[in-house]
Image: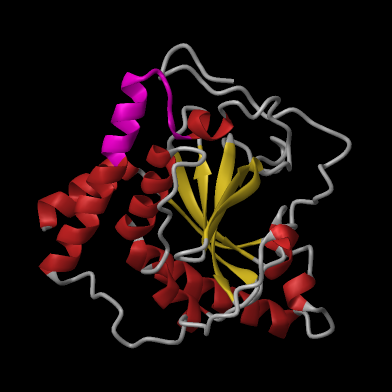
């Protein structure tokens, strides 16, 4: 439900016994996506941007400013990023993917959806985005973006494989894919799609570090639980995370650029 005022809190997700055929770890709608038979281009890359270079800080600052501009524009329309996702989607239920069927750009093989867990599982969060890039016929998870009840990003996080049912890729293969995440679609909202792209570009080195920390967490867990299938171990869900403040972080990048 859209809010009358941009600053009004979003309505929380409603519990639902039937989870739309999907558990929290299912990428709802994946089966309906055509298999991509193009060659995989998410190979390891040693040319990762160095955040100490002024030009990289400038690129990140510009991306952060773009994301903030989209938030400002939506605010002038008495909306926000999350409200745009939920527009015309009916009741907002826990676990269901929004928009229905996910968003997928076949040109870039980029994908995302928004959903919410029960409040006791993720306190302080309204819901979160899961972003992916497809390799072969399966999505590989890039980063999760937690949103507050006012539709603003508050945390970046990575997850264990079972959470999204992804095709597991090591960080060395995923980091180059961050530069190829791009959604050029009007559905469900052009501002939301471009906002997501801008956020990933703004936090690109941070996301790379979180993916590397994810891999280290997985290896530590495997060493501590040698009898467990670590990638399917429900005791390990979030593998790395970092609280963020888009306005603060963009300001710092602009000052340093």
Number of numbered discs visible in the structure rendering: 0
In the image, residue 72 lies in the stretch drawn in magenta: yes
Q: Give the quadrant of residue 96.
A: top right
Image: 194 above or below 88: below
Which residue is drawn at the image coordinates 36% and 27% (left, top)? 74
Residue at the top extreme?
A: 4
Tell me if 181 is positioned left or right of 232 in this view: left
Tell me if 94 is positioned left or right of 113 in this view: right
Image coords of residue 129 (percent x, y): 55, 48
**Viewer-nearest residue: 22 or 225:** 22
**Viewer-nearest residue: 26 or 12:** 26
**Viewer-nearest residue: 74 or 144:** 74
Q: Which quadrant of the figure contains the N terminus?
A: top right
Image: 237 above or below 3: below
Give, as a single range, the part of the protein colored magenta: 68-81
Q: Give the quadrant of residue 208.
A: bottom left
Question: What main secondary structure does the magenta stretch of the protein show?
Answer: helix
Image coords of residue 102 (percent x, y): 62, 49
Tell me if 90 is positioned left or right of 248 in this view: right
Which residue is drawn at the image coordinates 30% and 56% (left, top)? 202
């Amino acid at each position: 439900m859209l809010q009358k005022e941009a600053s009004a809190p979003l309505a929380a997700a409603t519990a639902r016994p039937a989870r739309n055929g999907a558990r929290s770890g299912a990428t709802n709608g994946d089966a309906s996506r055509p298999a991509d038979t193009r060659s995989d281009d998410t190979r390891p890359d040693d040319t990762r941007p160095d955040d100490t270079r002024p030009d990289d800080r400038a690129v990140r600052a510009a991306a952060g400013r773009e994301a903030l501009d989209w938030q400002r524009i939506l605010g002038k329309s008495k909306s926000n990023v999350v409200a745009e996702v939920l527009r015309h989607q009916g009741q907002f239920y826990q676990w269901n993917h929004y928009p229905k069927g996910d968003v997928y750009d076949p040109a870039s093989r980029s994908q995302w959806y928004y959903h919410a867990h029960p409040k006791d599982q993720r306190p302080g969060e309204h819901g979160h985005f899961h972003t992916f890039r497809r390799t072969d016929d399966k999505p590989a998870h890039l980063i999760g973006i937690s949103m507050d009840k006012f539709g603003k990003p508050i945390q970046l996080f990575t997850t264990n494989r079972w959470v999204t049912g992804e095709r597991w890729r090591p960080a060395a293969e995923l980091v180059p894919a961050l530069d190829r995440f791009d959604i050029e679609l009007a559905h469900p909202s052009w501002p939301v799609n471009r906002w997501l792209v801008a956020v990933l570009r703004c936090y690109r080195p941070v996301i790379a570090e979180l993916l590397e920390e994810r891999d280290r967490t997985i290896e530590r867990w495997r060493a501590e639980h040698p009898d467990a299938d670590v990638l399917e171990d429900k005791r390990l869900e979030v593998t790395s995370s970092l609280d963020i403040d888009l306005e603060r972080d963009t300001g710092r990048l602009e000052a340093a650029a």
